[in-house]
Every structure is written in C-alpha cells, then in structure tokens.
Image (cartoon, grey):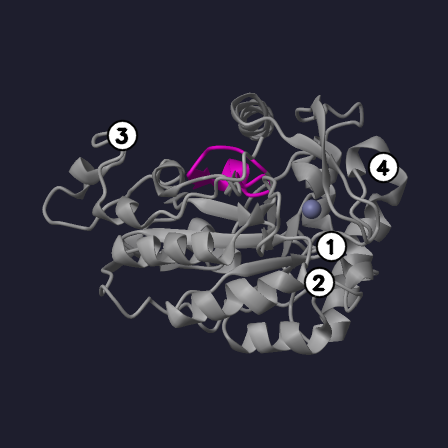
Amino acid sequence: MKNKNFRLNSSVLLLVISFVISSCSAPAQLVSITPFGEPVPLTETVGIIASPTPFQPIHPTNTLPPPPSAIPLPTWTPSPTVTPSPSPTPTWTFNEAGKVVAPILLYHHITDITPANRYYVSPANFKVQMQALKDWGFTTITPAYLRQVLVNGGDLPSRPVVITFDDGDLDVYQNAFPIMQEDGFIGAFYIVSTRLGASGYVGVEQLKEMVVGGWEIGSHTKNHYDLTVNHNIVRDEMLQSRLDIEDALSVTVTSIAYPYGLVDVYIATKAQEYGYFTGMGLGILTEHTWGTMYYLNRREVHGDMDLTAFARLLPWSGPILTPTPSSYDITATPGGSSVSDKIPTPGNGLP
Ligand SMILES: [Zn+2]
C-alpha cells in the first residue's frame, strides 16, 4: 500500500512539477479569440490553474487504461510517414523508453500581415527557419511518434523536432505546408472542429492532402474555449471534437492542444480518458518524460524572431559535426551561425 501511494504521489509530483515549470518559465499568455476572429493578445498573464477537483492520477503506461465503453477509442496507428529529411542524412539510433529530447515548436499563422504580431510569421521568415532546421540536420517527427518512442522506445534521428500549428488557419495549408514539403518535413495541425471549412480556416480536402503528406491532425477542441473555467464543457469540447475530426477526415486523432495552453489536473486526466495519447501545452522544456505526456511543452515561434532568436528555441543548432556536436550549441556560440546572414528583418516593430 505504501508503494502504491508512493507511485501515486510520484505521478502527482511529476505532473505538478511539469505544470509549474511550464507556467513559471513561459507563462501562457491569454489571447481572446472570437469564434472566427483574429486572436487579440491580452495583457493579462495567466499560469496553470490549479483544479479543486479531486485528483485522479494519470498513469502513463504502455497501454491506456480501459475507457468507459461509451467512448470509442482510437486504435493506435503510428504515423506511417516518419520520414527523415533527405539532406543531410540523419543518424537514427535507438532511444530507450521514458525520455525523449526533442524541441516542439508552435506556430499559428504563416502569412504576411502588416503590422505583424506575435502570431504571424511571414512565409519568408518561415522558409529561412525551415531551411536552417534542414541545414542543421533536424528531422521532423509527429507527436504520435514521439509518444510511441516515449512509451515503448524506438529509433530517433539525431536531432528530432516536432513542428505544430494551432487553430486551423488556412494560411498554414497555403504557405507552411508547401515550404515544409520541399524540405521533406512533416508537421502536426491542431484543428478547432467547429471552424473546419469556415472562411479563413482549412477544410476537409486540404487536411486530407496534408494527411497524405504525412502530417498528423490533432484536436484544438470544439470551440477554443478556456476549459479551466468550466469543467462542464470539457467532455463536449475535448471528446466530441476528436470524434468530429475523425469522422470528417477518416483519420485517427490521438493528440490535443489545450486552448491558450491552459490545463489543470482534471482536464489532463480527461484527455487520457477521452482517448488522447498526448496533450500539448506551452513551456520551454525540450526533454519529455512520462510525467509530461499530457502537458508537452511547446516553444512558440513569434513573428518578430530572427534566426538567432529562433535558434535559441532549440537544444541544438549549427551543422552536425562529429564528434562534438554539442560545441555548436547556440549557447556556446551565441549568434554564431553562417545562416544568420540570411535573416530577413521583419522591421514591423512587433511588441
Ligand atoms: Zn489556439
């Protein structure tokens, strides 16, 4: 009994630590998003909200606990196209279960807008960032594959990266998708299910095309509400959005991105119960463990970042040179990258 309690407490501790680290290090910034409007940054800074709900610990195991029979669970289908980028040739080695080091990047819009704000990265800047990742030997993997390696162990490229996009904006399909395809990269797109096919948002046929291209499609809930303020909507927002996206696209959805990166223990527990294998949040950690499976830290790429700032989001940058790739860490050589000459300066006076 003591051992059991210890394991429960460990789970609680891991989860809480990951939340606290995330909220302290990179506090989620609230944005106000009307159903079909532009995101408007608010000045208020909000961290993770503790839930008064009795705690139900999450047990990350190789198999999910049996769900209530009323909820159809997705079958586990690892991404069929975890393909290394063509150049330079990455080295894939076995990664033991339990820990994966991989930056998870978060974008929203990829489009030109004047004046830009943090949620809009220009296609020119995005192209430079993807080229840098390619030059530096990064290989994209999906959240599903990351989770599979985390739980079961598996091969990983020397520099894995997960590239995610929130909100389902059409410009991601129009601008990010083709640029990433050129580089042999795949991404993950988190869709607000009620916006599917709405003006300015991506539609079913476009998403199917991205799936064929190797992308993972995740849920960003049904209406993009802050789930922490009303637990009564959590089931509909989280579960129904998954089922609706799966019906529309005939794909399996196993990942959810919490709106505004806000989550509490109740929501994270429900994410697992509703069939999700990973939950995406915000934060600076690039090392992922079983304890962070339902609050995977993502580092947001802002519209005003030049390539030096972009490189600081990554645990590795610069070309892979054996035998000491760590010497090319950006912290060891600040600003030192030949690619930085190509940075297009936004010059839009972003906040
Ligand atoms: Zn969002």
Residue position for label 1: 67
Compute the Cα span from label 2 to label 3.
43 Å
Residue 293 inside the magenta-drawn segment: yes
User: Are the two marked residues, 3 and 4, in contact with CB atoms closer than 8 angstroms?
Assistant: no
Residue position for label 2: 73
Residue 306 is drawn in which quadrant? top left
Mark before the other along the chain sequence, 1 or 2: 1
Compute the Cα span from label 1 to label 4.
19 Å
Residue numbers of the magenta segment? 282-297
Of badges 1 and 4, the one in the foreground is 4
Compute the Cα span from label 1 to label 2.
8 Å
Residues 43 and 101: in front is 43
Mark 4 within 8 Å of ligand 1, using the beta carbon: no
User: Are the two marked residues, 3 and 1, in contact with CB atoms closer than 8 angstroms?
Assistant: no
Q: On the rendered image, what quadrant is the C terminus found in?
A: top right
28 sits to left or right of 348: right
Residue 54 shows in the view:
yes
Q: Which mark is residue 331?
A: 3
Q: Is the stretch drawn in magenta largely helix, strand or loop?
A: loop
Element at label 1: loop
User: Are the two marked residues, 1 and 2, in contact with CB atoms closer than 8 angstroms?
Assistant: yes
